[in-house]
Image (cartoon, rainbow, N blue to C red):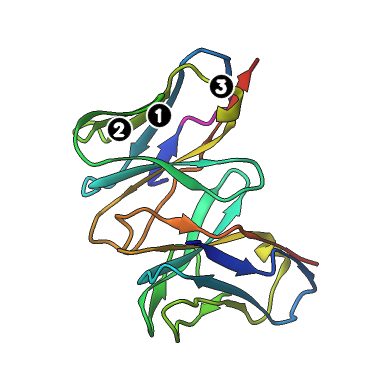
Amino acid sequence: EAQVTQNPRYLITVTGKKLTVTCSQNMNHEYMSWYRQDPGLGLRQIYYSMNVEVTDKGDVPEGYKVSRKEKRNFPLILESPSPNQTSLYFCASSLFPAGDTQYFGPGTRLTVL
Amino acid sequence: QKEVEQNSGPLSVPEGAIASLNCTYSDRGSQSFFWYRQYSGKSPELIMSIYSNGDKEDGRFTAQLNKASQYVSLLIRDSQPSDSATYLCAPSRSNDYKLSFGAGTTVTVRA
C-alpha cells in the first residue's frame, strides 16, 4: 500500500529535550516536506527536500532541522524544543515539486511542556 | 499579508444544499490549484485539482478558476454529512518547491 508514515503519532516532551519525528514514504517520491498546523493559521511549510541531500527552508524553519540521506526518509529534528513548537505536524511527499498532488502522513501531535 | 485567503467560516449548510467555498491568492504566477479535504484529527487528502480557467467537475464537486481575478472556488452540490470537514486551498507554481495553503474553511452539513 502506497503511504507516508510518521512516528511517533503522539509525543509529550519537556523544553530542551531533543527529539526526532520520523517520516518515510514508499512511493519513490523525490519531493518531501514538513508542515505544522495550528488553529487559525492553517498548514505552514517548515522545510522541504527536492531530492537526497537537497533541502531548503519553508516559511517557518526556525527551531527545526531536517536531513535527507535516503530518498524514502525525511526526519524532522527539534534540537531544543520550546512550548511554541507545540503543534500538529504533517509530513508529505509527491512525485514532483509543489505543483503536484501532496500525499500526507497521518500526523504527529507534539506537546512541549 | 497572507498569500492565500479563504472564507473563514465555519460554513453551515443543510443536507442536500450547495456549499460554496472561496479562495483568493496573491501570486499571479500560480499555475496549479488544489483543494484538499481534512476531516477532524486526520491528514489532508486531495479532492480536486484545476489548472485552466473555467469549471472542472468531479462527481458532486466543481472547482472554478479565474486566474485574472486570482480566484478559485469549490462547490459541493447535494451536500452530505460526510462532507463535514475543513477544506484547504493550495495554489502553486508548477516549478516551485514551496507550497502555501490557505487557513481552511470548515464546513458543517446538518441533517
Q: What segment carries the magenta color?
A: B7-12
The kind of residue tagged 3 is Gln
Query: Dot 2: within a 10 Å radius of its alpha carbon, few (fewer than 14), some, or many (20 or more) residues?
Result: some
The kind of residue tagged 1 is Asn
Up/down of B63 relative to A33, above or below: above
**Subunit bearing disc 2:** B
Q: Which of marks 2 and 1 is nearer the N terminus?
A: 1
Going by the image, does B81 lie left or right of B2? right
Q: What x and y, as percent, mark residue B5? A: 42, 38
Residue B22, numbered circle: 1
Residue B71, numbered circle: 2
At x 80% / y 74%, what residue is drawn? A14
Going by the image, does B86 lie left or right of B54? right
Rounded to the nearest whole Å, what is the CA distance between mark 3 and mark 1?
19 Å
Q: Earlier in the sequence, mark 3 or mark 1?
A: 1
Q: Is residue A65 visible?
A: yes
